[in-house]
Image (cartoon, rainbow, N blue to C red):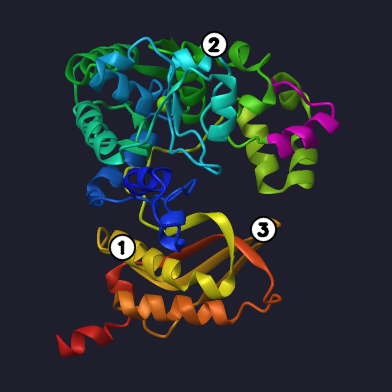
Amino acid sequence: MLRHAGDLGDRLGARRDVRKRRATTRDGSVRARTIGPRAPRHAVVASRASTQQCDAVRKFIHIDMDAFYASVEQRDDPSLRGRPVVVAWRGARSVVCAASYEARTYGVRSAMPAVRAERLCPDAVFVPPDFTRYKAVSQQVRAILLRHTDLVEPLSLDEAYLDVTEPKSALPSATAIARSIREQIREETALTASAGVAPAKFLAKIASDWRKPDGLFVIRPHEVRDFLEPLPVARIHGVGKVMDGKLAALGIRTVGELRAFDAHALEARFGRYGRRLAELAHGVDHGEVRPDRPTQSISSEDTFAEDVPLAATEPVIRDLAARTWAATRRTERIGRTVVLKLKTREFRILTRSRTPEAPPHSVDELTGIALALREQVALPASTLYRLVGVGLANFCDPDDTPAQSTLFD
Ligand SMILES: [Mg+2]
């Protein structure tokens, strides 16, 4: 997961075998959805109960740390303060993980290729990411959030939703809670966070972005309509470029226009998502804060610095299987389906999967299945691959799996 050691080795001209090349990946992180212990069941029950009681006024906060990784770097190294900092591995295919606000004034954004960031801001200081440190700070922030409610849903290391309809703290309002959280984060981590307060989750997320950085924005229930009306539809979470284009083709550019559009027509055109869009346009969001989001899949993937033929992928598949297996040790749930993902030089994505009768019980079993799946790829031998991934999906609780392993325990 921490690639920069290898990356430095690469830059220093280390031997360029497959493993070294792999070190300049753009995304080598293990993606483990919902790691950590599951929240106690009563928390979920509490969430449902509060929803029913308080359907009229529910109170959500979205907390978003400002330029998180870059801010941690600037905090820990005073020489970086006030300078454009780009958190990214170096390398032709690396992408920006985070950019400080100084770097953003040059147009640098996260997820942009690092080489482009370098062109936009030649004076930027490039820092390789250190996720161990970011995770530690993230846990500190999580602890602060949990003082106010058990209903905390982390979205990533630097973002979380809170349902504060029935808070633990005795503060008089959701706004007061958001203020208190921002103060506590500042005092205890020396970092800033932006907060959005609203009667719906999706609105809270838009609100936290409204006064960024170091801002607080509140949308009160009676303000929802006026706030939403002029907003471009792309501001709605989930409306990407493609959907934005489809809506524009229907003459829908703002949320007001979306609201005026016939809801049935939206549903007929876009299915369930169309219905959801119509609801969101009216400020209606049934989304609840889900502190207990069970693991659905865990995967690791790597992009090669130079494309390789299928035959050369075995060492990487072994390594990825080991990383995925290690990540699964953090959840009690059991992954039943093994997934192998490959991306060709032409960006064609192939996935092969297998659900064995009994879920894989060891890293060797997982590796064996992943390698067997590779044999099912029937593209010409000359095909080159830029990325490979190994994952486990289709997770279930231990109680739901056949008990054969316990027979011999
Ligand atoms: Mg952030």
Confirm whether residue 60 shows in the render: no
Visible residue check, residue 136: yes
Which residue: 30% across, 36% down?
Answer: 151
Graded by Cα atoms within 10 Å as few (under 14), some (14 to 19) or many (20 or more), the crowding at tag 1 reads many
Contact? badges 1 and 2 (CB < 8 Å): no
The front one of 288 and 250 is: 250
Q: Residue furthest bottom?
A: 408
**Is label 3's Cβ within 8 Å of ligand 1?**
no
Amino acid tagged 3:
Arg
Left or right of residue 206: residue 275 = right
Give the residue type at disc 2: Glu
Q: Which numbered disc flags the more N-terminal residue, 3 or 1?
A: 1
Q: Which residue is mark 3?
A: 345
Q: Are marks 3 and 1 in contact (CB under 8 Å)?
A: no
- Between the C-alphas of marks 1 and 2, the distance is 44 Å
Q: Amino acid at mark 1?
A: Thr
Rendered location of residue 387, percent (x, y)? 55, 58
Q: Residue at x 27, y 60 (%)?
A: 331
Residue that mark 1 sits on: 328
Q: Secondary structure at mark 3?
A: loop
Query: For mark 3, does the 10 Å Cα neighbourhood hold few (<14), some (14 to 19), or many (20 or more) residues?
Result: some
Range drawn in magenta: 241-255
Q: Which dot marks residue 223?
A: 2
In the displayed structure, does residue 210 sit left or right of residue 151? right
Q: Quadrant of the C terminus?
A: bottom left
Comes first in the chain, label 3 or label 2? 2
Query: Could you tell me residue 137's position as x and y percent?
Result: 24, 31
